[in-house]
Amino acid sequence: MVSVLTTQPLDRPLDYKAPPGGVADGAFVLVPLGPRLVMGVVWGRGRGGFDLSKARGINAVLPVPPMREEMRDFLEKAGAYTLTPMPAMLRLATRAPGLTDPPSMRKVYRMGEGEPDRMTDARSRVLAVLEEFGGLAFTLKELSEAAGVTSSVIKGLVKQGAVSEENTPRDLPYPTLDPSLPGKALTEAQEAAADDLRAGLRAGSYGTTLLRGITGSGKTEVYLEAVAAALAQGRQALVLLPEIALSAEFLTRVEQRFGAKPAEWHSGVTMTERRRTWKMVAEGGAQLVVGARSALFLPFRDLGLIVVDEEHDSSYKQEDGVLYNARDMAVLRASIAGAQVVLASATPSLESWVNAQAGKYRRVDLKSRFGAAVLPEMKAIDMRAEEVPSGQWISPALRQAVNQRVEAGEQSLLFLNRRGYAPVTLCRACGHQIECPQCDARMVEHRFLKRLMCHQCGENMPVPETCPKCEAEGTLAAVGPGVERLTEEATALFPEARIATLSSDLFSSARALKQAVATIAGGGADIIVGTQLVAKGHNFPALTLVGVIDSDLGLHGSDMRAAEKTFQLMRQVAGRAGRADKPGQALMQTYQPDHPVIRAILSGDEEEFWNAEAESRHQAGMPPFGRMAGIILSAEQADVAMAAGMELARHDGPIRAAGAVVYGPAPAPIARVRGWHRVRMLVKAPKGVALQRAVSDWVAGVRLPKNLRLAIDIDPQSFF
Ligand SMILES: [Zn+2]
Ligand SMILES: [Zn+2]
């Protein structure tokens, strides 16, 4: 009798009769559940406690490598940490299609032993192609295309033995990466940092290193040396990247370093390729995976290294479904697998900075910029002293600086972290602002698409001709800037310049975006108008000026991470300038030049900023010096969500017993999303409290209505 965990929403694994001869722990199996067959994983011995003759049997053991104990342990611990039921954790670990199918085969064609009875033109072309490519095998389609013949010509040659037909598995191993190839020449600083990382890998046990390298310091080359060390040991490596767009450039670098491309895992990968990656990772046919956060749940056979690049990036926090932070889960997985973690960033998260200060993580600093490049000069433009006409956002000072660059044949970046044309559409007659019908959010005008769009739920509609409230005609006005509007302004101000806009919603695919980035990097534009997208690691060698349109944008609001995020974003954006041999300059338009965050950015003294920020969080008992959990209640009726929150607040015994405090309920800052009303609660606890247990006891002790959704967010990153 064995216990089988399935992806079905049950509260525990179920017992099944093992097949004759038994079944290994971790085996992937098909089991009957009600009238259906579902996939599951053998999770240990059965619990018993019922009539054994009534137990159903395992239907089939699937031909994929069993889930290793290390992986099962990881899923259990990650589930316990994030308070996620195990079926949902198993779903994360099996997100590849066709795992239940028999191993899929395909036919390939090679040169055979026999001779054709008579030679025709078409036949000789087929044989010539096979000759030219030596012993290589072709699919039928490839061979008929290469030879310019129909498939029946090839089939005819097969019959006569002149061409051989073989069956091979469809999912083939990835090409071998060679860690012994010479990498790029490293600077002395890079070599020293790489040595530190290699030492960690030699230890062969768990350890985390914060690799802090300012933008342009060449930290990618450094951690690729750690990857090389892992591969040389015969272990696998995983590199997590925050943005798909990054991977094009990155894959090329990997290929240059190791002679072949790695496996990829992200939303842009086809289903067939996903299955291949999943299987090859499990069988050891993939040495290196480059992927998005969910790659952490791949079934590595021998994981030796996880690199989390741009570890501070907020996209590592999954905000839908299973709420986990990939950075923290990487550390957890590595600690179980006996692997090394490298957290790489120019501007680390406060959490990682504090862990390094406390000695929990090693810290390696890469100070000098690679090559001749130096950090850009940073200056504020005090907007209180600038005369900017209404409806425009580029100050005379910034305009002058851009003009100089255009004349010198250098690139400028105008940075505004706001997609679309204008954030607000307002009726000049009655003051009505157009909001999303389903969310508590304003509709953002996207002029290229000629639509109003909700950035919360994606709802969109044509821009109306009349005000939906007072029905006045032609009174709707765009208020405030988005990148599209900034492009319009730049086009008017710099009529001679070639202007390119980079915003995620302007590209239909990751490939189109890659293409645009490559064109711009090659000198295809004089001025780039861009959102946060450009802050993320793209290289623009001719870029020497960054103009930040609204440096104050992130400083408002109630988010405790506002200062940290603004600091990181501004440093990253400024770091785009002057990466080749020309020095760069960053000009930040601000109405608050004396704000501590703006001053810290300008002074360039990062340690001072982190120290001050850590001190203020410490004082307030905020993470990472205290712990938090967010509770999000949503329901179709506002009063249902609020009443449930009140009920939870009244029964907060388990929370108080743990020494923690409950705040709320209160309507969430975005109180309605997709028609669901949202109420938030916050649990704050001192460090060292068993927060997860207190929260699960608390929630389990209160009867909640059926038409209510409850989500628990341990270590919340955002509070919307
Ligand atoms: Zn109106
Ligand atoms: Zn909406």
Image (spheres, rainbow, N blue to C red):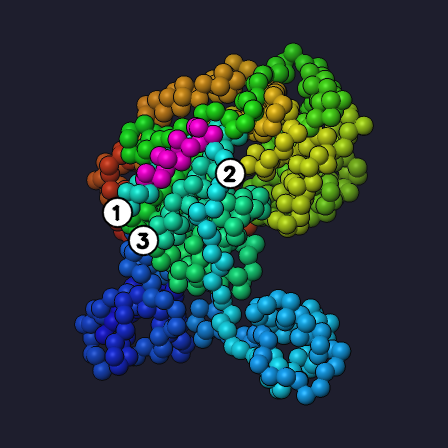
Answer above or below: position of 415 versus 441.
above
Residue 458 visible in rendering = yes
Q: Which residues are magenta?
A: 187-200
Residue carrying label 3: 74
- Disc ID at residue 623: none
Q: CA distance from mark 2 to mark 1?
A: 49 Å
Q: Is residue 477 visible?
A: no
Determine the CA span between mark 3 and mark 2. Answer: 36 Å
> Magenta span has 199?
yes
The span from disc 3 to disc 1 (Cα, nearest Å) is 18 Å
Give the residue number, with chain letter if any, for mark 1: 693
Give the residue type that dot 1 points to: Arg
Q: Residues within 10 Å of mark 1 (few under 14, many from 20)?
A: some
Q: Secondary structure at mark 3?
A: helix
- The residue positioned 67% from the left and 14% from the top of the image is 386
Element at label 2: loop
Q: Amino acid at mark 2?
A: Lys
